[in-house]
Amino acid sequence: MVISCDEIYLCPNGNVAQANAGHGDVLSGVLGALLAQGLEPVNALKLGAVSMGLCVDRLSEGKYLAGVLAHEAAQELLSLWNSD
């Protein structure tokens, strides 16, 4: 969920697989990179949250949820953003 002054955004992606070591660090790095590229803060938050959630959803299909490692999510993010 992202709160921006008078708006609330709910992210439809992601699951409990993000609640283990390193996922917050990866998300923080993604948000920092998006901000450094000039995205408006609320847009960086929305893009980062949805992208990371989608990556974890893809990786956790048919797996034990805690088995998704942070570096796997980061790699999946590269694949997601580089796909057509």
Image (spheres, helix red, strand yellow):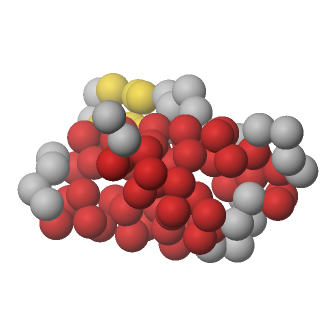
Q: Is residue 83 above or below residue 69?
A: above
Q: Residue 25, position in %: x, y?
A: 52, 72
The residue at the point 10 percent across, 56 percent down is: 38
Task: Name the residue at the right extreme.
Answer: 64
The residue at the point 36 percent across, 41 percent down is: 83
- Residue 71: tell me if it is visible: yes
Residue nearer the viewer, 69 or 10: 69
The residue at the point 89 percent across, 50 percent down is: 64
Q: Residue 40, position in %: x, y?
A: 15, 47
**Quadrant housing the C terminus:** top left
Query: Which quadrant of the figure has residue 23?
Result: bottom right
Q: Is residue 76 above or below residue 32?
A: above
Q: Residue 8, position in %: x, y?
A: 41, 28
Would residue 32 be found to the left or right of residue 52 on screen? left
Task: Name the residue at the front extreme.
Answer: 84
Would residue 56 be found to the left or right of residue 38 on screen? right
